[in-house]
Amino acid sequence: MKYKILIFLIFPVLFLFSCKRESPEVKRSVHITGTINVDSQLDPTGDYSGIQLLSTITTGTQQTDTLFFAVTDSSGFFSADAEFEQNDIYPVLISRNRNTFGILNIVFADGDTIRLDASLPNVNQTASITSNENDLLTILNRIERNFTRVANFINAGAFAEDSIQIEIEKWSDIYWELFEEYPETHVGKISGENSVVLLWGWNDEKMIERADLILENHNNFSAVARQVLAEYYAEVYGISRALSFFDELESRSEHPSSRMEIKMERIELLYDSSRTIEANRYLDQFKQEFSDNELALQWAENISYDIEFLAPGYPFPELTFITTEGDTIRTKELKGKPFLLEITRFDNFLYQQQYDRTVAIYQIYRNFDLEIITVPLASTDIMLQAFFEEKSKLWNIIQPNSFDVEELAETLNLSRVPTRFLVNSDGTIIRRYIGDEYDDVVQGLQQIATLTE
C-alpha cells in the first residue's frame, strides 16, 4: 500500500542540504539580518567578530555559486542580501576560524526579510529564525512531526484497514488548510504538495483538483509531486497523457534548471516504458541544449548507457557470484526462472524499510519460480550476521567481498543503492528500480505471473 512510503515522499521536501542548478536567469532576493554571539565559556572576550554565514549551490558547470555571505562585527551583528533563482529551502553554514558550528535550513523567498539569531557553539539548538515564510515552516514542521508519528502507527498495523483512508484524508486536509490560508507562499506550496502526495491512491480525484490549484498559483511542482502526478497519468490514461503533463510544466517553467529536470524526467519515463527510440531522440536534443552543463552531460552519459545496455527488454548482463553457502550463481544459467537481483548495503535505511516488502514478494512469487539474489556492498561477515540475527535468510545472499565492486558498478551503471533489476525467465530485463522506485515493482511482477500462467 502506498501509505508505506509516505514519510519518504514528503520528508525530503522539507530539508534540502544541497541543490544542483544551472546558472540562473531570474534573480530573487531576501534580506537577512541578525546577531550571532559566542558562549562565554568558549570565548570570554565578548568579541563576536569574524563569524561567517554562507549559503552556496553547485551549478551545472560544477562551479559553486554563493547565494548569501555575511560576516559578523564585534557585536555579532550581520546584515546582507541573499540572491537566488527559485524560492526554496537553502542550507546556511555558520563557521568561525574554519570550524563549522552548524547548518540551518532557511526558506529564501523573494521579498521576505529574515531575522536570524544564534549562539556558538550550539547553533542548531539556539537558533531563532523568524520571517513570514520561516514562521510558516515552523508550523509545517510541527504538522510533519505529528503526521510522521501517525504514519509509523499505520505502518506498524495499529490502524484498522477500513480506517486508514479516513486518517490519510484527514492529514491531507490538514496540510491543505495551510496552503489555502497562504496559497502564494513557498511553504504553503510545500504543504499543498504534501496534501496532493498523500492522496495518491486514496482519493485521486481530489488529488488532481488540488494539484490544479497549486499549478494555477505557482506554475510548477517539486520533483516528488511531479513524479506522483506523472505516474498517476501514465497508469490511468497512458504514457501520452503523462508526456503532455511534462509538456505543460515545461511551457510554464520560468527557470532553466526546472526545464532541465522536466526534460530528464520525460526521458526517464520513455526509457522505463521501453520507448527507447523516442528516449534516444529526446536525449540527443537534451545533449545539444545543455552541451555546456557538465552535470547534465554526466546524467546523459549515464542514461545513454542504460538505454543502450540496460533498457527493459534487453538481455541482462552475464554475472557470476559466490553465495554465503559457497554455491556459484551465474545469471546466464538462471534462464527458465525469473529473478530479482538487488545491490545494496545492509546498513542502508531505505533497504531496511523495504525488507519486509521483499519478504512478502518472495513468499508470493516463489510460486512463480522467482529467485532473489542480494549483493551486499561495503559489508563484512559480521555485518551480515548482525543483519540476519533476527531475520531468516530466505534467498541467496552473495558472500561479501567475493566480487569486484568497481566492475559490478560499471557493468550495471550503479549510482545509488538499493538498486534492483527484475529479470524475466528468458533473461531479459523487465525493469530497474532505484531507491523508492521499488514501490512500483508489483507491476513488473505481474508480468512474471502473466507469462507463467
Image (cartoon, helix red, strand yellow):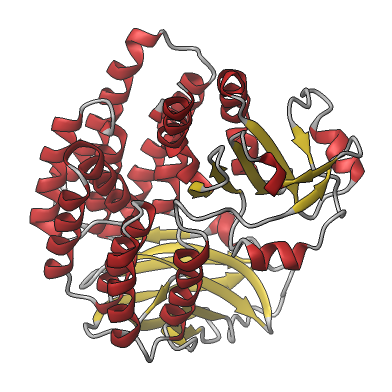
Q: Could you tell me which residue is drawn at 62 percent across and 82 percent down?
A: 47
User: Residue 317 sits in which quadrant?
Assistant: bottom right
User: Residue 267 sits in which quadrant?
Assistant: bottom left
- In the image, residue 208 sits, relative to residue 113, either above or below, namely above
**Residue 84 in view, yes or no:** no
Residue at the farthest bottom position: 292
**Residue 413 in view, yes or no:** yes
Residue 204 spot, x, y in % from top left: 19, 31
The quarter in which the C terminus is drawn is: top left
Q: Could you tell me which residue is drawn at 86 percent across and 55 percent down?
A: 401
As rendered, which of 20 and 191 lies closer to the eye? 20
As rendered, which of 134 and 165 lies closer to the eye? 165
Horizontal arrangement in the rendering, residue 267 relative to residue 432 (left or right): left
As rendered, which of 273 and 343 lies closer to the eye? 273
Q: Could you tell me which residue is drawn at 78 percent across and 22 percent down?
A: 392
Residue 76 spot, x, y in % from top left: 52, 78
As rendered, which of 126 and 227 lies closer to the eye? 227
Q: Could you tell me which residue is drawn at 59 percent across and 58 percent down?
A: 416
